[in-house]
C-alpha cells in the first residue's frame, strides 16, 4: 500500500507512525508473516501499532496493541468454534465431589 498525502500534517503523522512501527517490530519478538503484513497495512491506513480495530482492552482497561489484540481475538474465535476442544484438568486437578474442595 502506498501512502500519498498532500497535507504536511498528514505526512508528519505518517512518518511518526512508520517510525513507531519500525521500533515496535524491532522489540516485539516473533511475528508471523501474516501478522507483519496485517500490522503494516493497519499502520499504513493511519493507525498506531498500540491500537486495535476491536478496541480490545487489557486487564487494566488500556487498549491492547494490534498484534496481541489480533491474537486474543483468534483464541476467542477458536474457543467459540470448538467449545469441546478445551482441555480438561488432569490428575490431581480434577475434583469429583464437594469433599474435594480445598477449603
Image: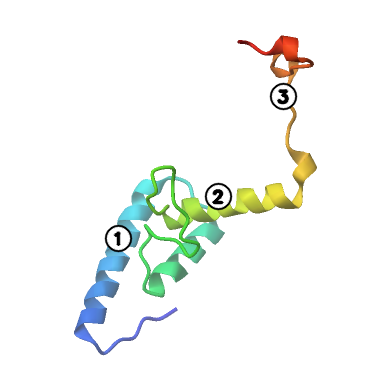
Locate residue 57, reporting x and y percent: 44, 51
Left or right, residue 43 beside residue 56:
left
Whether label 3 touches label 2, CB < 8 Å: no
Q: Quarter of the image holding residue 47?
A: bottom left
Locate residue 40, reporting x and y percent: 43, 66
How would you rate the neighbour count of disc 1 (Cα within 10 Å): few for under 14, some for 14-19, many for 20 or more? some
- Label 2 secondary element: helix
Q: Which residue is mark 1?
A: 20
Give the mark, 1 or 2, whose residue is nearer the N terminus: 1
Give the Cα distance between marks 1 and 2.
22 Å
State which quarter of the image contains the N terminus.
bottom left
Mark toward the viewer: 3 or 1? 3
Whether label 1 touches label 2, CB < 8 Å: no
Above or below: residue 21 compared with residue 3: above
Q: Quarter of the image holding residue 92?
A: top right
State which quarter of the image contains the C terminus.
top right
- Which disc number belongs to residue 89? 3
Above or below: residue 33 compared with residue 86: below
Locate residue 76, reporting x and y percent: 63, 50
Q: Which residue is mark 2?
A: 72
Amino acid at each position: 500500500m502506498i501512502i500519498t498525502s498532500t497535507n504536511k500534517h498528514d505526512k508528519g503523522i505518517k512518518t511518526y507512525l512508520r517510525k513507531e512501527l519500525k521500533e515496535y517490530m524491532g522489540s516485539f519478538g516473533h511475528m508471523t508473516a501474516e501478522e507483519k503484513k496485517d500490522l503494516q497495512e493497519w499502520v499504513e491506513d493511519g493507525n498506531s501499532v498500540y491500537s486495535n480495530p476491536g478496541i480490545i482492552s487489557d486487564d487494566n482497561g488500556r487498549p491492547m496493541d494490534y498484534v496481541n489484540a489480533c491474537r486474543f481475538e483468534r483464541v476467542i474465535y477458536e474457543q467459540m468454534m470448538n467449545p469441546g476442544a478445551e482441555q480438561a484438568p488432569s490428575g490431581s486437578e480434577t475434583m469429583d465431589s464437594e469433599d474435594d474442595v480445598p477449603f
